[in-house]
Amino acid sequence: MKHLLSTRDLDRDTAIDLLDVALDMAATQQREVKKLPTLRGRTVVNLFFEDSTRTRISFEAAAKRLSADVINFAAKGSSVEKGESLQDTAQTLEAIGADGIVLRHPASGAAAVLAGSGWIRASVVNAGDGTHEHPTQALLDAFTLRNRIHGDAARGKGLDGVRVLIVGDILHSRVARSNVWLLTTLGAEVALIGPRTLLPFGVEEWPVTVGDDLDSAIAAAPDAVMMLRVQRERMADAFFPSTREYSANWGLTGARFRRLPESTVVMHPGPMNRGFEISSEAADSPRSTVLEQVANGVSVRMAALYLTLAGGDR
Amino acid sequence: MTARTVLQEADITRALTRIAHEILEANKGTDGLVVLGIPTRGVELAERVAALLTQIGGSRSTLSTETVKAASTSASTSAAASSSASRPAAAGAATAELGSAASGAREASAVAAAAATAAAATAADAGSADAGTTGSSGPQSTATTADQPWVCPVGSLDVTMYRDDLARNPVRSTSPTRIPADGIDGKTVVLVDDVLYSGRTIRAALDALADVGRPAAVRLAVLVDRGHRELPIRPDYVGKNLPSAASERVNVLLTGTDGIDAVTIEDSASGAGA
């Protein structure tokens, strides 16, 4: 694997292989010495054109655990603000010696452009591009869910027949898109629930069921509920009348949480708006995987960096 | 591509049995042994060697201090009940006698005598005011665990992420590393692999092992040593020395992975194998 750009073009075997490598990476994080020598001498640049502390820290930790050298490049206050293009920035970074570029960009498709342009030889890992995809987030969600469902026997398995409910702002969510492709590739049945105004155009073409009634979806006893953050920073228009109405209709309130079966896993990619899309009762319960997802994020990103950067077939 | 069979099923079984005996002989018993296989085929070999070690080592009371302890605790149940008065006096001699029993005294009475005093020593060491209850409850609770025969701890050690040739080959998937629950600190770790060739895999394994813990000693057992070492690494236990040309390919086939037990060597113009 030379680049990791989207989950839509991942086939089932590649995805399961990546999750299995992540399982081995997670096991090394229980050891006395957590650092692996695998990417010694390789340089990874975190090229972030959008603010993101959590994803950047996670990628930074992953690269450092694999002994890569890490350069963090935040576009704010950099030459990008002086008008430098993505091409020039990337070529400058490669001239410095970057072997891998972790790219976060507000424009959908930026990672694919960088990878396919021929500007650079470095591997590109997409860390979120506009409202398109965020593949490592979906992979860590699938990893977390697979571990919760299969336990120690997770290796080599998919998510066949697992029913996942993705709730909230689907329109702006690259996490939702990446999850739809990955989870269905792994065999899960995905249902999207949200206000009609926050469902994307053309959603009926996706391999999912779509609805706007959270209560009846919860009554169907899903195996996992994934709450999405309402991305107020991406909302120029009014998509719903008020936050209270949103919370009442599509928030995972305490009452809704209590109606879920004991076995249902509650997921959230973070950062959470407590009391808005998710109640504290749900977020802090043992069935919530929020912190597990963060920890697994490092393992999954280690696997992604290993598979894109370690081999000689790059 | 003409493959010649070098070892058949019976040869492999015999080689592994001999290796198990050699391990017990060199280790002077089963004390602290941990067997770790290197994926893929080393894991199956390690499991077989460990099963043989359990089978052979578990029955050798003279070699195994574990079994001496087992005998001592079962004997002590009666001894502790009868001789509560002699306890403080006998406690001093206990350590010396147990030591000699462990080093090879086979006589049952000596073991029993040492056992009775050893039990007394542990009771005295516990410093309990009520010696009677300690004497009756202590040995019984340890007897249940000590009565279980010794089972050789076995696991696997993936070395993929420690290889020095990662950048020269297409990226490979990792395999699970399973370390026995008691860990490897202070233990004698026997690494098991199918074919020893350049020695680079073993170098990577030593690095991986150092990240897991600090064994007292590391030994190396291989089914086939085909020569052509590139590093100063030498196996401690060898199933078969197989002088080979670098252009030949040595294949180890095992029942669990390949459905058949065999070692074959074949001429392949396309170059080095294993």
Image (cartoon, rainbow, N blue to C red):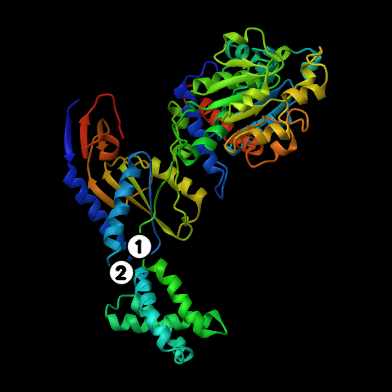
Q: Which residue is mark 2?
A: B63
| Residue found at x 50% / y 40% | A151
Measured along the vertical axis of the image, is residue B125 above or below residue A253?
below
Whole-number angstrom distance, CA of label 2 to CA of label 1 = 12 Å
Q: Residues within 10 Å of mark 2 (few under 14, many from 20)?
A: many
Q: Is the Cβ of the residue at disc 2 closer than 8 Å to that at disc 1?
A: no
Q: Amino acid at mark 2?
A: Leu
Residue B195 screen position, x and y as percent: 30, 41
On the same chain, marks 2 and 1? The answer is: yes
Total of numbered circles in the picture? Answer: 2
Give the numbered dot on residue A181. Answer: none
Within-10-Å neighbours for mark 1: few <14, some 14–19, many 20+:
some
Left or right, B127 with respect to B163, comes to: right
Q: Which residue is mark 1?
A: B150
Residue located 32% across and 44% down the image: B44
* Residue type at numbered disc 1: Trp
Q: Nearer the viewer, residue A157 or B210?
A: A157
Most foreground residue, A16 or B30: A16
Task: State whether residue A95 appears in this view.
Answer: no
Residue A136 picture location, percent across and down: 60, 26
Q: From this viewpoint, is residue B199 visible?
A: yes
Subunit of label 2: B
> Is residue B82 positioned above or below A64 on the image?
below
Residue B129 or B4: which is nearer the viewer? Answer: B129
Residue under the point 62% across and 18% down: A177
- Rendered position, A177 above or below B111: above
Q: Quadrant of residue A168?
A: top right
Instruction: Identify the element where label 1 is drawn.
Output: loop
